[in-house]
Amino acid sequence: MRRTNSSPARRLPSRTVGRRAGGQPRRASLSPRLETALSYGFALLLGATLVLLTFPADFLFPRAGAAWAPQGDAAQHAIAQRYFIGDAWRWPPLLAANILPPGGLNIAFADGIPRSPWC
């Protein structure tokens, strides 16, 4: 004869959902949105920590006229590269129309060719 309890069994809330094949409880997983947010947050924290450990503060937050700022030709190269990267691709390939409009400037003459076109 089977014995029944008149009051229903009370279950305490648990973080387990069902059981695995081996009888081990299966844990409830995080929502995909929360999991993505935590992953990006951890990556951001790790990246910021590595940047702060790698670079000095005066490099990350420069003051005007700092000693490491590019001077002379190096400044000209950097400025030409920024104009070239900020402009649209066209023929001839090294023409930056946003320097010396309306004709533009071939940045080979400004020595501003970046190492990679995807900079």
Image (cartoon, grey):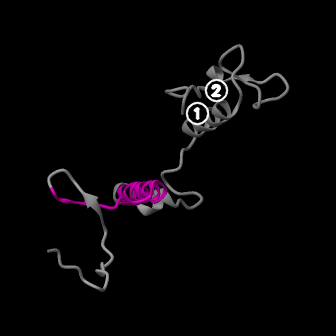
The quadrant the N terminus occupies is bottom left
**Quarter of image, res 41:** bottom left
Mark 2: few/some/many CA within 10 Å (<14, 14-19, 20+)? some
Residue that numbered label 1 is attached to: 77
Mark positioned earlier in the residue sequence (1 or 2): 1
Q: Residue furthest top?
A: 92
Tell me which corner region of the image, top left, top right, bottom left or bottom right, holds residue 75: top right
Which span of residues is magenta-colored? 23-52
Q: Is residue 29 magenta?
A: yes
Q: Position of residue 26 (x, y in %)?
A: 26, 59
Q: Position of residue 12 (x, y in %)?
A: 30, 79
Q: Secondary structure at mark 2?
A: helix
Q: Are marks 1 and 2 in contact (CB under 8 Å)?
A: yes
Magenta segment's dominant SS is helix
**68 or 78: nearer the viewer:** 78
Q: Which numbered circle lies on residue 113?
A: none
Q: Position of residue 27 (x, y in %)?
A: 28, 61
At mark 1, the secondary structure is: helix
Query: Residue tagged by mark 2?
Result: 110
In the rendered structure, the answer to whether residue 19 lies left or right of residue 77 reads: left
Residue extending farthest right: 102
At 30% from the left edge and 81% from the top edge, which residue is drawn?
10
Q: Residues within 10 Å of mark 1 (few under 14, many from 20)?
A: some
- If the image is split into quadrants, where does the C terminus sit? top right
Q: Is residue 8 left or right of residue 114?
A: left
Q: Amino acid at mark 2?
A: Ala
| Magenta segment includes 51 | yes
Where does the image place residue 54, in percent across and percent down from the top left? 35, 54
Query: Which residue type does callout 1 highlight?
Result: His
- In this orientation, which residue lies closer to the viewer: 79 or 118? 118
Dividing the picture into quarters, in which one does residue 31 lie?
Answer: bottom left
The alpha-carbon separation of the residues under discs 1 and 2 comes to 7 Å
